[in-house]
Image (cartoon, rainbow, N blue to C red):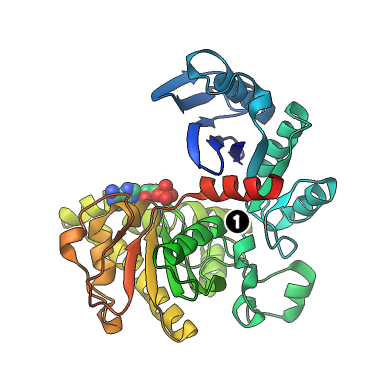
Amino acid sequence: MKVLVLNSGSSSLKYQLLTMPEAAVLADGLVDRIGIEGGNFSHKANGEKTKFKKELADHKEALNTVLELLTTGETAVVSNIEEIDAIGHRVVHGGEKFTSSVIVTPEVIKGIEECTELAPLHNPANMQGILAMQEIMPTKPQVVVFDTAFHQTMKPENFLYAVPYSWYEKYGVRRYGFHGTSHKFVSERAAELLENKELRIINCHVGNGASVAAINAGQVVETSMGFTPLEGLVMGTRAGDMDPAIVSFVQKKENLSADDMDTILNKKSGVLGLSEISSDMRDIEEGMEKWDEKATNAMNVYINRIVKYIGSYTALMGGVDVITLTAGALENSGVMRKLILDKLGFLGIELNESVNDFRGEERVISTENSPVKVMVIPTNEEFVIANDTFNLVK
Ligand code: AMP
């Protein structure tokens, strides 16, 4: 079966065409600046990368061009769009309504729209991809895979905030968690590699966005992102955990609106805010090498937050069997992996330094004697979307 995986942002579109269940990638690419002057295409197929610019009014136009690339000329990997059997979409927020991936029906569309209030920027963008594909390929099944669904096993003791209960009842204020497809993929892969489904796993997804999840026997106990992706770890540009009193204090001092503050905490804080250099951990590592004080502080705050979450999730699960590291920073940076593991000696964890210098591979990096296994497992969110789509429509 051929599955087209789509991740639609407000002005961007990531796609991948895979054959399932083999999970062979036939083509993938990225379109950005949709609806903005100067649309950009980057398409990879048949071992060649194609880049070009094209004005794009909306997602439908972008998708039609992607389908043209997939079916015609040197970039083609199928002879016509009828060869595509199903479409899998990433949707950010499924609220409490969606606990797993589902085939798109009119009720599902309504359900996603009802969750829009919880993800006002993301869900409408995801919907644009779904609606466009319904127009272009109305007879093909479409599946939606939610970032929040895997976390729906959390119990009230871990998803409730200590604020008036009526906020939960009236507005759905609770911890939802995000990066669910990544936490699911990595924890299931660890269980498969270790041939044990009963493991207590702490998965650290640390890329530009970052979150930790405590997963016991395949069920999420708790995760660090909350009502929105702003909570938890320090991220590229997001603040993560902080005293909520800071918000009104600085708002009054600087005469900021609620929206101004929202933008600052999401786009101008985190590593970028602390270092005043960059949101990219490669630049922060470089800054540290040059003894830049702000870069060093940013890295230390960043690492300590990860270590704090590993410690608290170990306590919450009554122990931990495996720590998995994934996403851009921890798949690629031996320096950051070492900084974290050097602080986990209290768990008996020891880094096997001789195997830590690598990028983007599956590897155990703890020593043989380590009572907790530490593994790097590159994440693959597209695979989860393709696989859920395959399983629902086969
Ligand atoms: P992701 O969001 O998973 O694509 O991760 C992207 C982020 O990973 C970048 O913004 C960097 O902060 C980080 N990253 C990628 N490669 C490296 C590297 N070699 N060393 C340190 N950080 C990296």
Q: Find residue 310 and report its horizontal and vertical position in percent.
A: 40, 75
Judged from this view, the residue extending furthest toward the top is 73
Left of 54 or right of it: where is 334? left
Label 1 residue near ligand 1, CB within 8 Å = no
Quadrant in which residue 11 is drawn: top right
Residue 234 appears in the figure: no
Badge 1 element: loop
Does 97 sit above or below residue 280? Answer: below
30 or 81, which lies in front?
A: 81
49 or 363, which lies in front?
A: 363
Does 347 sit above or below residue 146? Answer: below
Q: Find residue 52 and report its horizontal and vertical position in percent.
A: 47, 19
Does 114 sit above or below residue 204? Answer: above
Inspect the image, locate mark 1, and give the three-letter code of the amino acid beneath it.
Answer: Asp
**Badge count:** 1
Quadrant where the C terminus lies?
A: top right
Quadrant where the N terminus lies?
A: top right
Mark 1, residue position: 147
Q: Find residue 233 and report its horizontal and vertical position in percent.
A: 44, 66
